[in-house]
Amino acid sequence: MPTTADPNRVTHVGRRTVLGLLGVGVAGIAVGAQVDGAVGGVLTKVSSSLGGLGALLPGADNFRIYTVTGTIPTVDAASYRLVVDGMVERPLSLGLDDLRIRLPRTKLVHYFQCVTGWRVPDVHWEGVRLSAVLDAAGVRKGATALRFFSGDGEYTESLTLSQARLPNVLVADRMIGDDVTPDHGGPVRLYVAPMYGYKSIKWLDRIEVTDRIVPGYWENGGYPVNAWIGG
Ligand SMILES: Nc1nc2c(c(=O)[nH]1)N[C@H]1C(S)=C(S)[C@@H](COP(=O)(O)O)O[C@H]1N2
Ligand SMILES: [Mo]
């Protein structure tokens, strides 16, 4: 299994970080706005030609942009929160400043593989290990799994606790050398390197610690809950 994680802390001080700092203390998540303009038009068109099951666009970076709702949620960076709740000692509501400054950062380079066959090689990922987020919240005894929720209001995912603690599972706020863009699930998405792309939930806004696996969106549609690439 490729593990090129960099144990060194990486701190970015830039425009987005300043925006994040300005957002300290602001609660609430602004999501759900429909995309208007060219991108939204294409997504709507493609989406309806797929019977509403998904939308895809060939990205300049060779990713295909998927969204099961047919829209790209716009999430305000300054007011973004990631809630960590359920079977934890300390429920958390993390802002971008928490992810970018207060928690230990890591980066890795790894391909992105969709179960439908497309793959993007050598993608640079950066963020906080999911294990570090879980440690900050303190997982309670008896917990075995996680449920992930998206700001799109529909997509969900799941991991077992031991899968979630692998070092190449990231709460990612940077990819391809930039902040995660709205179409890729920004400001924050999950990146589960050892598993197919459907595990890497976009517009991540809540992680619930549970005592059982609750299958996610595509898993309810028949995809395996254990999505090991080549497994
Ligand atoms: N919220 C949300 N997350 C999602 C999806 C989605 O439709 N909605 N599609 C998944 C699938 S099947 C893949 S392959 C990747 C695609 O990531 P990309 O859109 O950044 O290329 O996102 C995953 N995460
Ligand atoms: Mo996928």
Image (cartoon, rainbow, N blue to C red):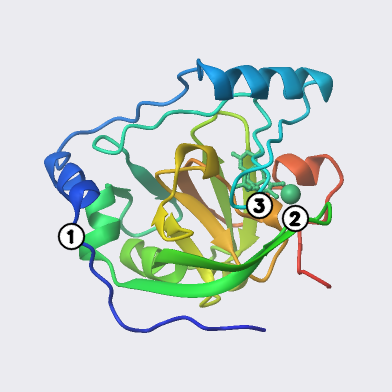
Q: Position of residue 151 (x, y in %)?
A: 49, 33
User: CB at mark 1 closer than 8 A to ligand 1?
Assistant: no
Give left or right: position of 164 versus 23.
Answer: right
Write down the quadrant of residue 40 in the picture: top right
The disc, 1 or 2, on the residue closer to the chain's N-terminal end is 1
**Left or right, 19 with reference to 107:** left
Q: Which mark is residue 13?
A: 1
Q: Please state which amino acid type lies under the numbered disc 1.
A: Val
Give 47 or 128, whichever is nearer the viewer: 47
Label 3 vs label 1: CA separation? 28 Å
- Judging depth in this view, the residue of 112 and 133 nearest the camera is 112
The answer, for residue 212, to whether it is visible in the render is no
Which of pointers 3 and 2 indicates the residue nearer the eye? 3
Residue at 74% x, 23% y is 47
Q: Position of residue 208 (x, y in %)?
A: 49, 49
Q: Secondary structure at mark 1?
A: loop
Q: Would you name the residue on which mark 2 appears?
A: 114
Q: Report crowding for label 1: few under 14, some 14 to 19, many 20 or more residues within 10 A (C-alpha).
A: few
Taking depth in this image into account, of 58 and 83 the one nearest to the observer is 58
Residue 103 higher or lower than 17, as above or below: below
The tag on residue 62 is: 3
Tag 2: residue type?
Answer: Cys
Distance of label 1 from label 2 (alpha carbons): 32 Å
Image quarter of residue 90: bottom left
Q: Is mark 2 within 8 Å of ligand 2?
A: yes
